Image (spheres, rainbow, N blue to C red):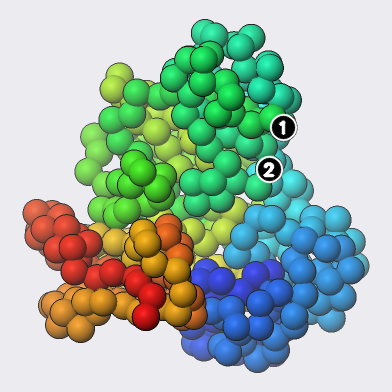
Amino acid sequence: MKKAGILGGGQLGRMLLQEAANYAVITHILEKDIDCPAAHLCHHFTQGDITTFEDVYNFGKNLDVITIEIENVNTEALEKLEKEGVTIIPKPSVLKVLQNKIQQKEFYKNNGITSSEFAITYNKKEIDQHKSLFPAVHKAALGGYDGRGVQILQDASDADKGFDNPAILEKLVDIKQEISIIVAVSTTGEIKIYPPVEMIFDPLLNLLSHQIFPAVLSNTILWKAEALALNLVKAFNSPGIFAIEFFIDKQDNVLVNETAPRVHNSGHQTIEASYSSQFDMLWRIMLNYPLGNTESIMPAAMVNIIGEEGFSGPAFYRGIEEVLSMDNVFVHLYGKKTTHPGRKMGHVTILSNEKQELIHKCNQIKRTIFAESK
């Protein structure tokens, strides 16, 4: 059996391992936290730092294939492992581009991928040099995740709210919709696209609140988004799962926002709503099997369970019994022992052929289940 490694042991690693049970594969996890969500589901757990060369190299040198559940990994170790014959999905070359938001935006520009207008800044003082971009979004080049490392600047007087290290200053898009398209690319270059999902964000936490799948789009916008997604993954020239997030502005322009080279929050509903989930698809890619069927079984919605304000400590899920009693509702808890405000603790998927029922149940679930501390 193939030996497969996952760098990171959070909820994405957990859901990958849940799907791995359907395949003949020996699974390995590298993670600092021995109590991480994925620790008890793998065959072999290694405690270590996914950002250090030594830990990543030693973890991977006896494996057949390695993937990631977060971009912030040591690419130098992965490059060495790749040269020594270990299959890395996605390729380290793609990770190096997407780890850094400056390089990511320049990659879009150089490959003709439509994105929002931007400038590069290296300190707060440089923000004032780009007044034409205001109102703008300032994004730290490194380390941003789940809303962190992002700051909205209305005008130059907000410069102090920005980042005093390398960052991109993006012109704020007048957004009509935000969507995500997940694309699967096999080791032989076969490509399959999932239907787009519409994402609705929490304006305070800057985190995904809930999403509707598939997104309701005109054919023109759908074709534009799919064409951009295909052109982008072809430019990456790498196997893997790619979650491409788009802005659709009030003039129906379609702009690539960001890309994640891995399974992604915007694809969680595929577990119940698609014939082949994003997690199943990644195992097919890693094990060199044919790609699965990306068609929807039926429409779905997904709600994130996020740690409540004012609660930090051992996790407790108030209202979970009521949610579990609802028809066509599926609860996924991530096994995190502690909660804190804004932390992703789980998600709930809803299936229905009626969009209004999906939206109604989304709102009902958000009012019912809460991640609190005991």
Q: Position of residue 362 (x, y in %)?
A: 19, 60
* Callout 1 amino acid: Asn
Residue at 65 percent of width and 70 percent of height: 8
How far across and how far down the image is residue 144, in percent? 60, 46
- Do callouts 2 and 1 mark residues in contact (Cβ within 8 Å)? yes
At a point 49% along the width and 87% down the height, the residue shown is: 22
- Would you say 344 lies left or right of 368 here? right
Relative to 332, residue 221 above or below: above
Picture quadrant where residue 329 is located: bottom left
Amino acid type at image mark 2: Leu
Nearer the observer, 287 or 330: 330
Q: Tell which of 272 and 127 is nearer to you.
A: 127
Q: Residue 312 has which mark?
A: none
Q: CA distance from mark 2 to mark 1?
A: 9 Å
Q: Which mark is residue 165?
A: 1
- Residue at x 70%, y 89% (from the top left corner): 44
Q: Is residue 268 visible?
A: no
Element carrying mark 2: loop
| x and y percentages locating residue 361 in the rendered image | 14, 63
Residue 175 point in image, percent of width and height: 33, 29
> Reading the chain from its start, which is encountered first: label 2 or label 1?
2
What residue does disc 2 label? 142
**What residue is shown at x 53% (from left), y 14% (from top)?**
156
Quadrant hosting residue 159: top right
Q: Is residue 135 above or below residue 89?
A: above
Quarter containing the N terminus: bottom right
Q: Which circle, 2 or 1, is nearer the viewer?
A: 1
